[in-house]
Amino acid sequence: MITEAHGIPLAVSLTGGQRNDITQLMPLIAAIPPVRGRRGRPRQRPDRVYADRGYDHDKYRRQVRDKGITPVIARRGTGHGSGLGVHRWVVEQSIALLHWFRRLRIRWEIRDDIHEAFLSLACSIMACDEDRNRILSQSIRSGRRPVAGGRLVVR
């Protein structure tokens, strides 16, 4: 899973349980959608990527740099307390939020496409909830009444 700075999932991939995380670094970076909102060409990639010691490999650092992204990856064999945990806990929190969905906590589906569909749906719900919370907090700070967005309510 790769998230933005506030924990909204940008890209998710599903692999086997004993698969090394580093094998999914470049496909996840390639799967990041364009960021809209400002005029001009939408941004295609982030400025920096924060990662833990599991992603420490010079080959992948070079590949990330070739894409124009600064890798901020903890080195193996160095002491803890580098300060990267301040940025990395956001991803851990997002993974913990995925476990709120009982269907994703333990994988019962035999087919991986069904599990991946539920994973995508959960990430979409997380993004909508984060967007709604951000709109509410901005309206409370500004003192204005929140405007209802395109939310579907089924009764």
Image: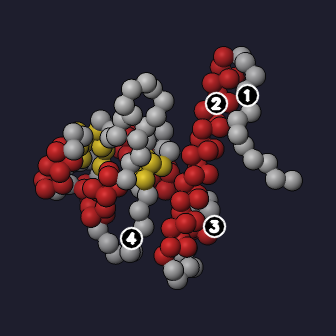
Residue at 21% x, 44% y: name it.
67
Residue at 41% x, 62% y: name it.
13
The nearer-to-camera label among 3 and 4 is 4
Please give the label number shown on residue 102: 3
Mark 3 to mark 4: distance in Å? 19 Å
* Circle 3 Cα neighbour tier, 10 Å, few/some/many (<14 / 14–19 / ≥20): few
Asked whether disc 3 touches disc 2, contact meaning CB atoms under 8 Å apart, the reply is no
Colour convention of the picture = secondary structure
Task: Tell me which label, 2 or 4, sits earlier in the chain.
Answer: 4
Image coords of residue 110 (percent x, y): 52, 83
Q: Nearer the viewer, residue 132 or 27?
A: 27
Please give the label number shown on residue 15: 4
Image quadrant in which the N terminus is located: bottom left
Q: Which residue has dot 1 on it?
A: 147
Please give the label number shown on residue 135: 2
Q: Nearer the viewer, residue 135 or 98?
A: 135
| Residue 34 in sight in this render | yes
- Of the residues shown, which amino acid type is indicated by label 3? Arg
Mark 3 to mark 2: distance in Å? 27 Å
State the residue lying farthest toward the bottom. Answer: 110
